Amino acid sequence: MTDLYAVAGNPISHSKSPLIHSAFARQTQQDMLYKAQLMPLDGFALKAGKFFEHGGSGLNVTVPFKEDAYRFADEWTPRARRAQAVNTLKKLENGRILADNTDGVGLVRDLTLNHHLSLTGKRILLLGAGGAVRGVLQPLLEQQPAELVIANRTLSKAQQLALDFADLGVVIGCGFEAVEGAFDLIINGTSASLGGECPPIPASALKADTVTYDMMYGAGRTVFNQWAHEQGVTITLDGLGMLVEQAGEAFYLWRGVRPDTAAVVDTLRRERRV
Ligand code: ATR
């Protein structure tokens, strides 16, 4: 029987997840169907409940339902508990719903496997302190960077996040203007680019071999990566690889098979969809 999966969000028509998971299913010969599911803004739990009652096997969850999906689940992976927001739900054999957050491991896999960067012992600056950043903190800290600085427009949110994850490594929260010294890696996890803006960090945060990474992606460089490029940064990466890797990790949780994620990143870039 064909197993049914979907990505749930609002809006959802722009989502590349159906394309990505269909490619994974073809590659690994899994008998599954994956569709995009528009959810009502005030009715995630009801609609997700119906999806699973009617035979659905798993859901990916995107903006703005990741916290709703966290509350909807019956069981959580440790990283999902930390993130308090999830992008993957799986119906277990006993009917209970397991929640996972694969965003952080997707980011780390993209950085370390696709781009061959080591994070261990490095100075990392993470911009933003919303759900996207909370979701990636545990997997990033598991790589044991020397120091992870969280800088955010609203200082209190950066400080709170730093406190919440202090047991996992050296984590510091500050405002953009208080960012000091240069970093090996700067990750933009703010939604500033959506409004065409760039988080105002000092240019002194960059050095000759700093790598910048924007969790967002688009046809050209993001506003943040464009700024870094203009300051002389040579490696500016976007979040397409993270998108495909978080999908690969969800696919693995559901099907127990690892898809060839690099091939799908290549196809998406070649087809100039992004
Ligand atoms: P997400 O789920 O994408 O993380 P979020 O939880 O609403 O969304 O968080 C958005 C993040 O982007 C926050 O860190 C926000 O900063 P504040 O905490 O100060 O609101 C940040 N952000 C949004 N627009 C921004 C801008 N124009 N400049 C800088 N930071 C911005």
Image (cartoon, rainbow, N blue to C red):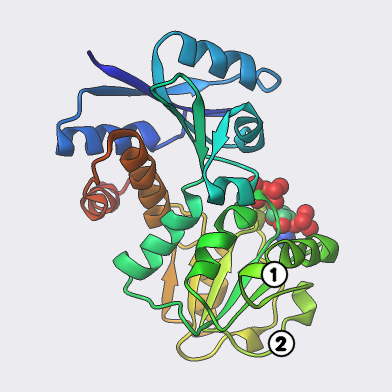
Side of 219 where 71 appears, left or right: right
User: Could you tell me which residue is drawn at 37 percent across and 61 percent down?
Assistant: 109
Q: Amino acid at mark 2?
A: Glu
Q: Position of residue 121 (x, y in %)?
A: 49, 85
Q: Nearer the viewer, residue 263 or 268?
A: 263
Callout 2 secondary element: loop
Q: Is residue 194 visible?
A: no
> Which residue is identified by label 1?
166
- Tell which circle, 2 or 1, labels the residue nearer the N-terminal end: 1
Side of 240 where 165 appears, left or right: right
Q: Is residue 176 above or below residue 22?
A: below
Q: Could you say which quadrant of the image residue 54 lies in? A: top left
> Which residue is identified by label 2?
180
Q: Nearer the viewer, residue 15 or 49?
A: 49
Q: Could you say which quadrant of the image residue 262 lies in? A: bottom left
Q: Is residue 68 visible?
A: yes
Image quarter in which the N terminus is found: top left
Q: Could you say which quadrant of the image residue 151 lies in? A: bottom right
Ligand 1 appears in which quadrant?
Answer: bottom right
Q: Amino acid at mark 1?
A: Ala
Task: For ligand 1, tell me if the residue under mark 1 lies within 8 Å.
Answer: no
From the viewer's perspective, is the residue at label 2 or at label 1 nearer? Answer: 1
Side of 44 where 61 appears, left or right: left
Q: Position of residue 117 (x, y in %)?
A: 37, 76
User: Could you tell me which residue is drawn at 66 percent across and 31 percent down?
Assistant: 71
User: Could you tell me which residue is drawn at 56 percent across and 61 percent down?
Assistant: 138
| Other residues around mark 1 within 10 Å, as few (<14) / some (14–19) / many (≥20) | few
Task: For ligand 1, tell me if the residue under mark 2 lies within 8 Å.
Answer: no
Q: How many numbered dots are placed on residues in this image?
A: 2
Q: Position of residue 100 (x, y in %)?
A: 50, 41
